[in-house]
Image (cartoon, rainbow, N blue to C red):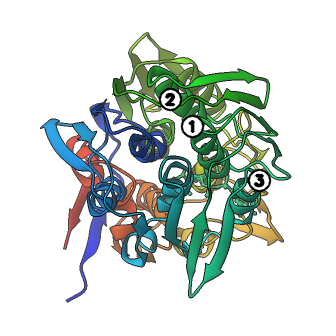
C-alpha cells in the first residue's frame, strides 16, 4: 500500500521551531573528512536521509564513524576503498563530492556518474574539466568516472559556469595539491564559505577574494572539531509556511551573516522581528506581498527558494513574475500548485502569477525535495484535505519535517 501524507489545511501555524544544521554545508563537510586520517568531529549535523546515505558511503570507503551525541559525529581512519558505488551515488548526487578528496589524498577514485534528477540533467563536466586541468587522468566507462593521478598540481581553474559542488570538489582537491591553485568564478554560497572555514581549521591554506579562491597546497591536514551553521533553506521553508498559513511563530536560529541575508530577502514577503538567536514572525494580520525575482548565484535569490516563493506568490496581494535561470527544469511544482488553485502563466522558464489565488486541498505528487516542501506549504494553507504522494523526497533534506510542522499545529500525518 503506497504511503502518503494526509494534510488538513487552514490552520495558522503557532508556536516555536528550531532550525537544524545546514544539509548543503554538512555534505561537503563529510566529504572533507577523507582528507585526513585524524578524527574530525562535526556537530549540528542534521539527521536526514542524505546525511545517512553519505555516512554509509564513507563507511563503505573504510572510514570509522561514531555517533558522539545527537547531531554530533566523529569520523576517522584511512580508507580501504576508493570506489563510490552506484547504490550511494544514485541515491544522492552530492556523493560526487568524494571525487576531489579521493584523488588528492589517494590518487585514485572510481565514482559512479551521478544521475540527473527532476530539476535538470545536472552534469559534472565542469568538475571533471577542472580536475583534468590539475593533472588527473579521468575517463568515463560503464557509468563510472575513473580517475587517477600521480599528484594534483596547483592550477588556475576558471569555472565558465558557477557551480557549488564543482567549486567544493576543486577546493578539496587543491588543499593537498602541489603548489598554488587559483579558482576563478568560484561559487561563494554560504555552503562554500563553511567548507573553507572547516578546511582552514584542518590546516589548509585558503584565501577568498571576491569570487576567487586562492589555495596553497599543504602536505597533510589534521583533525578538528567543527560546528555546522543553520540551514538557510529550511529557515526560508518555515518562514514562508508561517506566511502562507497566516500564522505567528518564533523561529530559533542563530542569525549569522548568511541567515541575516536570507531573512532580508524573505522580509519582502512580510516583515519579521530579527533578534540575535530568534526570528519572530507574525502574519496573523499581515498581507502576503508578491516578490518578483530571477534566481541567481549568491547573493541572489537561491534557486532552492524558488519553489517555496511560488507558493506565497500565488496567494499574495498582487501579481509577480519569477524566472528560474539556474536549472533547466525546476518548475515541476507548478502543475501541482495549479491543482491547489494557483493561477499563473508560464513562458519558458518565466512565470507570471496573478496573485490572490485561494488554495483548496487536493491530491498532489512530489517530484523533488524543494518542490515537495512547497506543496506541503500549499496543502497546510489550503482549505480542506490533501493527500501528498512521493513525500519521501522531502525527508531527504529536512530534519523532522513532519514532526516540526505538527508541533506548530499543522494537521499532517503519514498514512
Ligand atoms: C548545489 O547543487 C546544491 N546541492 C543544490 O541544492 C542547489 O540548488 C545548487 O547547488 C545551486 O545552488 C548541494 O549542495 C548538495 P551547481 P549543485 O553545480 O552543486 C550546471 C537542494 O535542494 N553545472 O551549482 O549540483 C548545473 O546543471 C539542492 O538542496 C554544469 O553544467 O549545483 C546547473 O545548471 C538542489 N556542469 C548550474 O550549473 C557542472 O559540472 C548550477 O549547478 C556542474 C554544474
Looking at the rendered structure, the secondary structure element under dot 2 is helix
Residue at image x 37%, y 56%? 380
- Residue 83 left/right relative to 264: left
**Does label 2 or label 1 sit earlier along the sequence?**
1
**Does label 3 or label 2 sit earlier along the sequence?**
2
Residue 40 lies in quadrant: top left
Residue 99 lies in quadrant: bottom right
The mark lying in front, picked from 3 and 1, is 1
Placement of 180 over or under 154, stated as above or below: above
Q: Picture coordinates of residue 10 (x, y %)? A: 36, 53
Residue at image x 60%, y 22%? 205
Residue linked to disc 2: 199
Quadrant that contains the C terminus: bottom left
Check residue 148 in the rendering and tell me which mark sits there, or answer none: none
Looking at the rendered structure, the secondary structure element under dot 1 is loop
Asked whether mark 3 and ligand 1 are closer than 8 Å, the reply comes as no
Residue linked to disc 1: 176
Q: Residues within 10 Å of mark 2 (few under 14, many from 20)?
A: many
Q: Picture coordinates of residue 291 (x, y %)? A: 71, 42
Amino acid at each position: 500500500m503506497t504511503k502518503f501524507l494526509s494534510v488538513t489545511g487552514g490552520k495558522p501555524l503557532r508556536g516555536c521551531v528550531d532550525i537544524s544544521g545546514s544539509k548543503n554545508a554538512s555534505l561537503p563537510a563529510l566529504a572533507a573528512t577523507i582528507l585526513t586520517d585524524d578524527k574530525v568531529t562535526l556537530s549540528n549535523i542534521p539527521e536526514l536521509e542524505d546525511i545517512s546515505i553519505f555516512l554509509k558511503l564513507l563507511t563503505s570507503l573504510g572510514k570509522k564513524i561514531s555517533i558522539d551525541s545527537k547531531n554530533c559525529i566523529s569520523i576517522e581512519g584511512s580508507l580501504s576503498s576508493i570506489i563510490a558505488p552506484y547504490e550511494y551515488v544514485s541515491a544522492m548526487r552530492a556523493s560526487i563530492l568524494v571525487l576531489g578528496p579521493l584523488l588528492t589524498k589517494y590518487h585514485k577514485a572510481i565514482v559512479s556518474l551521478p544521475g540527473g534528477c527532476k530539476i535538470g540533467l545536472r552534469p559534472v563536466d565542469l568538475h571533471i574539466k577542472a580536475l583534468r586541468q590539475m593533472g588527473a587522468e579521468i575517463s568515463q566507462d560503464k557509468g563510472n568516472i575513473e580517475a587517477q593521478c600521480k599528484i594534483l598540481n596547483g592550477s588556475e581553474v576558471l569555472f565558465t559556469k558557477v557551480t557549488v559542488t564543482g567549486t567544493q570538489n576543486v577546493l578539496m582537491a587543491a588543499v593537498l595539491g602541489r603548489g598554488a591553485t587559483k579558482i576563478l568564478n568560484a561559487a561563494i554560497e554560504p555552503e562554500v564559505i563553511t567548507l573553507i572555514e572547516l578546511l582552514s581549521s584542518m590546516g589548509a591554506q585558503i584565501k577568498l577574494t571576491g569570487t576567487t579562491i586562492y589555495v596553497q597546497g599543504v602536505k597533510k591536514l589534521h583533525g578538528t572539531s567543527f560546528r555546522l551553521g543553520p540551514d538557510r533553506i529550511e529557515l526560508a521553508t518555515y518562514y514562508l509556511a508561517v506566511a502562507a498559513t497566516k500564522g505567528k511563530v518564533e523561529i530559533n536560529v542563530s542569525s549569522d551573516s548568511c541567515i541575516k541575508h536570507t531573512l532580508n530577502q524573505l522580509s519582502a514577503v512580510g516583515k519579521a522581528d530579527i533578534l540575535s538567536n530568534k526570528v519572530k514572525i507574525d502574519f496573523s494580520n499581515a498581507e502576503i506581498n508578491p516578490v518578483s525575482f530571477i534566481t541567481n548565484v549568491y547573493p541572489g535569490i537561491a534557486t532552492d527558494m524558488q519553489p517555496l516563493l511560488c507558493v506565497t506568490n500565488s496567494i499574495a496581494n498582487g501579481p509577480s513574475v519569477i524566472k528560474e535561470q539556474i536549472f533547466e527544469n525546476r518548475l515541476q511544482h507548478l502543475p501541482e500548485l495549479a491543482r491547489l488553485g494557483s493561477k499563473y502563466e508560464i513562458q519558458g522558464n518565466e512565470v507570471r502569477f496573478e496573485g490572490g489565488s485561494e488554495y483548496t486541498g487536493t491530491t498532489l505528487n512530489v517530484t523533488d525535495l524543494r518542490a515537495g516542501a512547497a506543496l506541503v506549504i500549499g496543502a497546510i494553507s489550503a482549505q480542506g484535505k490533501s493527500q501528498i504522494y512521493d513525500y519521501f523526497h522531502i525527508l531527504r533534506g529536512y530534519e523532522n519535517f513532519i514532526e516540526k510542522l505538527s508541533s506548530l499545529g499543522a494537521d499532517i500525518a503519514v498514512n
